[in-house]
Image (spheres, grey):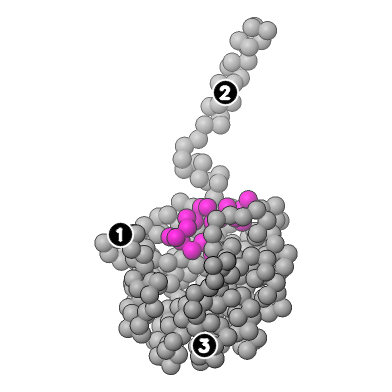
Amino acid sequence: MVDGLVEAKPVIRAFKKKRKMNLKQLRSQLNPPWPVLDMHVHPLDCFGFYSVSSVKEDARLLTESARRAGVTKMCLFSLYRTCPREPSVVECRMANDYVLAMQDMAAGIFLPFCYVNPMYPQEAVTEINRCVGKKRMYGIKLWVARRATDPGLNPILEKAVELDVLVLQHAWIKTTGNLPGESFPSDVADLANRHPQARIIMAHLNGIGLRGLEDVADSPNISVDTSGGDAESGMVETAVKTLGAKRVVFGSDAPIRHFSGQLAKVLATDLPETVKQDILWNNAVRLLPKWSI
């Protein structure tokens, strides 16, 4: 028995040597084997608990973190520094200028969205024309100001259809009650039904759960992003089963959540590899305007 153990030692050492890898090699094993388009990312500058000295530093830190996790491109929208306070028209404009500047720092990585406050629908349309009309931005992000049932959103959705860009709409079902102006998934379904030609991403899969998925299942122009919390067993699979594989897109909500932990929601599922690739890249590319990718 002792002799057998002695003979086995060189084999064990060789196995350990073969299995040993540095951090870069380990990441290559853990990162997704396909490109990843994250549909839900904010600048660090939005949140008071992050300190960045410049737009350049903000862009560098986000792109480095994304690269380490395997994220290729990011749809980026600022909430300005007012979050969670409602932004003014001027503050929305400043937020949009900030992400356009970030785009200049990392061309081809950031796909900025135009941030507008639906409390000012006509001013929002003017800002969308400024930012999206010249193909500088690739979608519209709505501040949580009016529920999606409110007709005040109609001019914004009509402009989105005209310019062929998608709209990202925040939604949640909170046990403590939603905030004033915060949409439930059923509200988003109402919005989608009023504007059947619009392409809508409803944010926060983990915040809406099965009930929210069922509320929008019959609205084919709504897709759902995977953000909204940490991984929950079976949640992404449930979204695919309820909506179909083509209506689920990857979103991290970084930097509130980390890219890697959010990617694990998709990569750790038992879904077919083709479905994972759809969620991480193909579905987003199909929703974005043709001139964006």
Vertical arrangement, residue 36 with respect to residue 25, above or below: below
Q: Is residue 281 visible?
A: no
Side of 217 relative to 21 (left or right): right
Q: Are marks 3 and 2 in contact (CB under 8 Å)?
A: no
Q: Are marks 3 and 1 in contact (CB under 8 Å)?
A: no
Q: For the point 60% across and 79% down, which residue is it?
A: 188
Disc 1, disc 2: CB below 8 Å? no
Percent position of residue 267, x then y? 61, 53
Q: Amino acid at mark 3?
A: Leu
Q: Earlier in the sequence, mark 1 or mark 2?
A: 2
**Earlier sequence position, callout 3 versus callout 1:** 1
Q: Position of residue 263 (x, y in %)?
A: 55, 55
**Could you give the CA–CA distance between mark 3 and mark 2, rounded to whole angstroms?**
65 Å
- At label 3, counting other C-alpha atoms closer than 10 Å, the crowd grade (few under 14, some 14-19, many 20 or more) is many
How busy is the neighbourhood of tag 2: few (under 14 within 10 Å), some, or many (20 plus)? few
- Using the numbered discs, state the Cα–Cα distance from disc 3 to disc 1 in whole angstroms: 34 Å
The residue singled out by tag 2 in the image is: 14
Q: Earlier in the sequence, mark 3 or mark 2?
A: 2
116 lies left or right of 173: left
Secondary element type, mark 1: loop
Check disc 3 and report the residue beneath it: 153
| Residue 104 picture quarter | bottom left
**Residue located at (51% from left, 41% from top):** 26
Which residues, given as a range, are shown in magenta?
Answer: 249-268
**What is the CA distance from the residue labelled 1 to the residue labelled 2?**
46 Å
260 vs 67, nearest the viewer: 260
Q: Is residue 4 magenta?
A: no
Query: Which residue lies under the disc numbered 1?
Result: 51
Relative to 268, residue 141 above or below: below
Residue closest to the eye, 67 or 14:
67
For the residue labelled by badge 2, is the local secondary structure a helix, a strand or a loop? helix
Left or right placement of residue 70 versus residue 271 in this view: left
